[in-house]
Amino acid sequence: MTELLVDIGNTRVKWGINQDGEIISGRPFVHHQLEQKVLFEIWKDVCSPGCLAISCVSSKPLLDLVRTVALSLWPNIEIVMAQSRANGFGVCNGYIQPEKLGVDRWLSLIAVRQHYAGPVCIVDCGTAITIDFMDAKGFHQGGLICPGLTLMKKALAQGAEALQFNTQNYPLGPANFTDAAIYSGTLYAAIGFIERCFDKLENSTLILTGGDAELIAEQLIYKPIIDNDLVLRGLAIVVAGQK
């Protein structure tokens, strides 16, 4: 059975098709690009999925839009909403209130548990940078959260009158104009956060995912694995577990 997998994040909507265990990723959307007619045009050529699996950490209107388009195209489609749990799929959630762990983080833990061996450090380089630790037995050791690169830049622009938000990339290092200084300062902050967290881990694998994963990975002193489909992989595992 073909499955449509959708990851509604804080900034982007990622989606893919799970066909016989192989995930084929579609083009992601930033939120302001996502309109009902646009999504309809893209999904109308998808071959009748039997299931729509959704991870959502964003607003209800976006979730409603995704469900509305899917049901208009495939009225009998089964919709599965992923939720964080205390235990499941070989993972033990380390949060005191397991349901409070972001479902995207939970799904990433599930995917990593199935696809990678040993203790791991999972870093999602998205709107927020989240770091989660899991031991070789699947016990989640907790995590940390800080603003992502774009959010750091926006915070500076909103909190300091003379600073402007800029998305351009510059050479990394001490800069002689403000935009480049902000670029390097925020990137160094992310690098330092990740390296500090990974420094004292022994025999762990560093895995990066999220929109800024490749940019950050290039500057780390450690060589990480980049896997940008972790949440979609986790969704596929959850669906398979319900069959």
Image (spheres, helix red, strand yellow):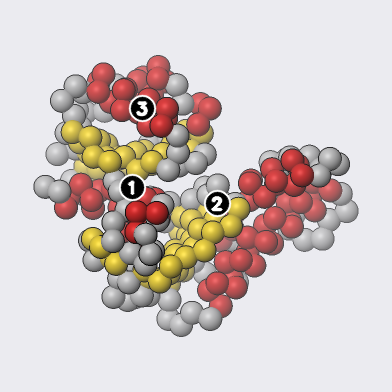
**From this viewpoint, which residue is outermost toward the right?**
176
**Gap in angstroms between the C-alphas marked 3 and 2:** 23 Å
Left or right position of 104 against 242: right
Q: Earlier in the sequence, mark 3 or mark 1?
A: 3
Left or right position of 43 against 123: left
- The local secondary structure at tag 2 comes to strand
- The local secondary structure at tag 1 comes to helix
Residue 188 in sight here: yes
Answer few, some or many: residues within 10 Å of disc 3's Cα (few below 14, many 20 plus, some between 14 and 19). Answer: few
**Circles 3 and 1: CB atoms closer than 8 Å:** no
Towards the viewer: 21 or 204: 204
| Vertical side of 160 occupied by 93: above or below | below
Left or right position of 74 against 100: left
Marker count (numbered): 3
Left or right position of 134 against 17: right
Q: Earlier in the sequence, mark 2 or mark 1?
A: 2
Residue 37: % across, % down: 40, 17
User: According to the image, label 2 marks what residue?
Assistant: 128
Residue 214 in sight here: no
Query: Could you tell me which quadrant the N terminus lies in?
Result: top left
User: What amino acid type is highlighted by mark number 1?
Assistant: Leu
User: According to the image, label 1 marks what residue?
Assistant: 232
What number is the disc on residue 64?
3
**Gap in angstroms between the C-alphas marked 3 and 1:** 19 Å
Q: Residue at x 64, y 46 (%)?
A: 150
Q: Nearer the viewer, mark 2 or mark 1?
A: 2
Q: Nearer the viewer, mark 3 or mark 1?
A: 3
Q: Residue at x 48, y 51 (%)?
A: 210
Residue 190: % across, % down: 63, 60
Q: Residue at x 36, y 27 (%)?
A: 64
Towards the viewer: 158 or 14: 158
User: What amino acid type is highlighted by mark number 3?
Assistant: Asp
